[in-house]
Amino acid sequence: MSVTSYTESLYYDKNHDSWRADIRFIWAGEKIRKTISAKSKSELQKKVQDYKIDVFINKNILIVDDITFTDFSAGWMENRQKKVMKQSSYFTKMRTMKNLVNPYIGNRKMTEITKDDVQKVIDTLTESGRSFSSIKKAYEFINGCTRYYRVLKNIRYYPCEGVELPKVLEKEEGDYKFLTKQQRQLVEEESYKRYENGSFVYRYGPAMVLLMYTGMRFGEMVALTWNDIDFKEGTIDINKNSVYVDMDGEHRYIDGEKLKTKCSRRLLPMSQKARDALLVIKDSYGDCSGTDHVVRTKHGAHPVPGSFNKCYRSILANCGIIKHGESRGVHMLRHTFATMLFENGCELKIVSELLGHSNTKVTENIYIHTIQAQRIKAIKDLDCYCK
């Protein structure tokens, strides 16, 4: 059953020195009135939105014409998605809503959103240079939200039907960056540099070497504790993840998050280079009360991704690999690890397992050019053998 005759007015009440909202609507023939007050206008607007979410979504009472995409999607996220998603995934989806969707259709009424509106969002994001991944997330958010609206209203409502996403360009060689053998040697040497007093020039230098010779994701390394390291058996237990998220404007880590995929849970054999990096970190970081994390700030906290990446770019720039100020992320070290394995003749399935990919197809799609080069080399070696 739907709401009719909905009105909403916000005003400042001088007598009580507060902001007030007067909400009136008719539902199932009953006149309903709700008065909400707050000290500030922004606080009042938040309370009004919370009330709408509770009444019009939690209780499945829908405003026929007046509920906007912003109000409805906020309720959908809070009361439906939040219950079934990982915390980090939830905040990522919230960023998609706030940054990629609401600026374009947030003020549109749900009943007015059309295929053309959704297509315009996709086209605008494409023209602004957003990645295919970001555009797809925006589309999936709109599609999920409008689909839920359709189910609640029990109506035919398909604003995403027929919307065209930009084509994914086939990966060109060089789309993923990795370090060559000579560059690896330079980075390793630079990462271990120390001042005369023995302290590291780059606090996170040894951690860069650890990433390069383990292929761990950044979040996996951040979550790593010394209990996960078994020097006797020579293994690193990858069993958890730490995710850096924006929580309503405040950035912080979420610890104990599930790994990216089920296959991400793995026991990683420790190479000598990785062992050396871990021993250097253990000997150099010193005791830090209250933490057992392998890589940490001098105060025992998790390294902020921005600071860690800045350190990495400085190392690359000082090695002459990139120019100062040029962008480059530490995920390049994971690509370097995979490339080393392929160049050393490692099988696709083994590489995929060491990287923690969900299946070999993911690995093959990322490293298609490296794999093809190895296939060509294998045939050439066979030709030489047969002569």
Image: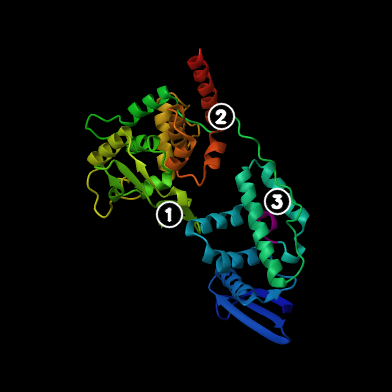
Q: Residue at x 71, y 67 (%)?
A: 150
Q: Residue at x 57, y 81 (%)?
A: 15
N-terminal label among 3 and 1: 3
Q: Which mark is residue 160?
A: none
N-terminal label among 2 and 1: 1
Mark 3 lies on a secondary structure that is helix
**Res. 110 in view:** yes
User: Depth check: 310 or 274 in front?
Assistant: 274
Mark-to-mark CA distance, 2 and 3: 34 Å
Give the residue number, with chain letter if any, for mark 3: 121
**Residue 123 percent across, percent down from the top left:** 72, 46
| 384 relative to 320, above or below | above
Task: Write the start and end of the magenta stretch as one range.
Answer: 101-107
Give the residue number, with chain letter if any, for mark 2: 369
| Badge 1 density bin: few <14, some 14–19, many ≥20, Cα 10 Å | few
Mark-to-mark CA distance, 3 and 1: 30 Å
Give the residue number, with chain letter if any, for mark 1: 252
Circle nearer the viewer, 2 or 3: 2
